[in-house]
Image (cartoon, helix red, strand yellow):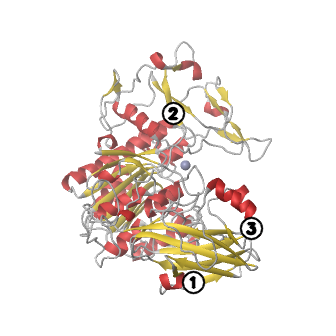
Amino acid sequence: MSQSVPAPTPGSLSSRSTRGFARRALLGTAVTASAIVTTHGVPEASAQTAPVVIKALPIDRANVLAGSRFDFRVEVAGAQPDRIEITVNGQDADTFFKGANAVRTNEIAGKSGEVTYRNVTVANPGPVSVQVIATVAGRSYVDTFTWTVLRMGAGQARNVILFISDGMGFPTVTATRIVSRGITEGKYDGFLNMDRMEYRGTVTTSGYDALVTDSANSASAYATGHKSVVNGMGIYEDNTKDPTDDPRVENIIELAKRTRRMATGLVSTADITDATPAAFAAHTRRRSEQAFVASTYLEDGHRPDVLMGGGSRWFLPKAQQGASSDDRDLVAEFRAAGYAVAATRTELRATPASATKLLGLFHTGNMSVWYDREETKNPNVLGKFTDQPNLPEMTGRAIDALATNPNGFFLMVEAGSVDKQLHPMDWVRAVYDNIEFDNAIGVARRFQEKNPDTLIIVTADHSHAMSITGTYTPYEGKLGPDAVGTYAESVFPTFTRKRGDGFPDSPVTKTTLAVGWANHPEHFDDGTTVWAEPLGPSIEDPQVKGTYIGDPKRAPSGKGVLMPRTVPASVNSEVHTADDVPVMASGPGSEFFNGLVDNTDLFWGIVASLGIDPLSPNGRSPMGKITGGRFGDPANPASRPHFAKP
Ligand SMILES: [Zn+2]
């Protein structure tokens, strides 16, 4: 894709926007020229031929919300530059970002130079061209980067509830519909709540560093409108080790609080500091910094009004078996800040109806999954956590608390363990948690019926390698692959549903789904789909530390087929895939979530639906309504690049 705005050409330097092969050839041959055009986005091998590589953060082709806060950083790698000159739209960067302090550093001795501006904003919508000239030993290197600054039109939504089922690809939705609603003669006997939304689109999932995303950079794209890197959230990766100093971009919770004083909430069945919820409020290069995330949740500007999920250990000091930052008792600190605190379902139900600030931490780690928590109540699995609320309950309580804010609310609800059960290839536990997720959407839909100014969005952050091959009917001693019914033999599953709560009466039935996996570690398969306890597919090889082999326990019949691994031996579970994922939406602004959208576009859809405008004193866009599923300033076609780009 070529840059639409040519960079200004200072002095005698030649600035070229060549890309791809032409530019790479240039890099290999231009050493005699007085000016060399270096490049971003060049593959590593080609970059080796470039003595100096210039990086700008935010990256080329980033979209920036007018008036949103972000850190701007330029990194020059390969040599220590004598000078780094930065112009933005032809102005010196110090002038353009007036009031911001440029901090100049040399992080890698003799081999780098950086310039960082913290907390800057851009007001005018349209293209922004950043040109960087690095001078090394009398030779100049130049590169240009283009961002698009967008200003939103008036929004129609007062509240936004974003549902994320972690790892829910299209096959997981299909399996959930089959198991939960049933299918007869090729027609479904009912549809899921998420199926009955007005709009349905497809979301791309890659981060800027790699094809396959993890939950951190994916949620970061939804929360900030900027792509990030694996394990990163709310940041662009810099060249320093510190995971908390990377250039930040403002997230939706910060924007909703700062510009509109909206109520905000995060609910998850995983640790509430896990990647997906954390990306909506915190900034770190390393998602494992969960104690840091927990302490961020208490800070002004980042503090959600409602936090519910697992992961109490990140909030508690050592004396209470916790691992909090600086050994603080964050639970006590939240209580002192006016939060009602609950550690069990019973305590959650006992919180006063008037409580608008809630901290619910129902497990030291991830909450147990529905199948163990609500169906078998297996004491070996639950341990002392026998009184955990479910996702529909938490969602309902969160909405009750947040809806009291006259400025509206933003709530993110995550089914965290759909992913955590797809990794060990336990599709039954994953689907049960996805039914729980769909029931939570039902709670939000009932709120929306009475509050039609509520936008509900349902999506996933990435997919898994699960696929429905057909159905599985063990008979005449046949097990495993031999009992899989393909094509005409894939007779319809026989789950029964007398309870009427969306769940089948039992996951064990004569004909169940035959689920295959496009990637997996070595494992045994005898067709077992329900294990008494969550069980990984592989165990560490006693001969070779750090590598994994099939666990015979996976095939209790002792007749399992050994499936050879399709990923490196160091990988002990099935892994995420690059597949697109679904997005469904209902309510004002739902038309933005349609067709093929980039994962960063979900942020823009949320901001456009709410009409968030940091430039207005009340945070509301003074401009007209945006129609036609496009974002940005209707008076400025340059600010509407989405979908229109080839
Ligand atoms: Zn995962």
Q: Secondary structure at mark 3?
A: loop
* Mark 1 or 2, closer to the camera: 1
Q: CA distance from mark 1 to mark 2?
A: 51 Å
Picture coordinates of residue 175, whole percent (x, y): 43, 34
Which residue carries the number 3 mark? Answer: 51
User: What residue is shown at x 53% (from left), y 42% (from top)?
Assistant: 464
User: What residue is shown at x 52% (from left), y 68% (from top)?
Assistant: 6
Q: Does label 1 or label 3 sit earlier along the sequence?
A: 3
Q: CA distance from mark 3 to mark 2?
A: 46 Å
Label 1, residues with CA under 10 Å away: few <14, some 14-19, many ≥20: some
Question: Residue lying furthest top in this view?
Answer: 476
User: What residue is shown at x 47% (from left), y 16% (from top)?
Assistant: 489
Which residue carries the number 1 mark? Answer: 102
Q: Secondary structure at mark 2?
A: strand
Picture coordinates of residue 23, whole percent (x, y): 65, 59
Picture disc at residue 89: none
Q: Does label 3 or label 2 sit earlier along the sequence?
A: 3
For residue 541, what is the image quadrant? top right
User: What residue is shown at x 42% (from left), y 75% (from top)?
Assistant: 301
Could you tell me if residue 354 is visible in this image?
Answer: yes
Taking depth in this image into account, of 406 and 41 the one nearest to the observer is: 41
Which residue carries the number 2 mark? Answer: 467
Residue type (three-letter) at the residue carrying disc 1: Ala
Image: 507 above or below 548: above
Residue type (three-letter) at the residue carrying disc 3: Pro
| Cβ atoms under marks 1 and 2 closer than 8 Å | no
* Mark 1 or 3, closer to the camera: 3
Picture coordinates of residue 122, whole percent (x, y): 43, 76
Q: Does label 1 or label 2 sit earlier along the sequence?
A: 1
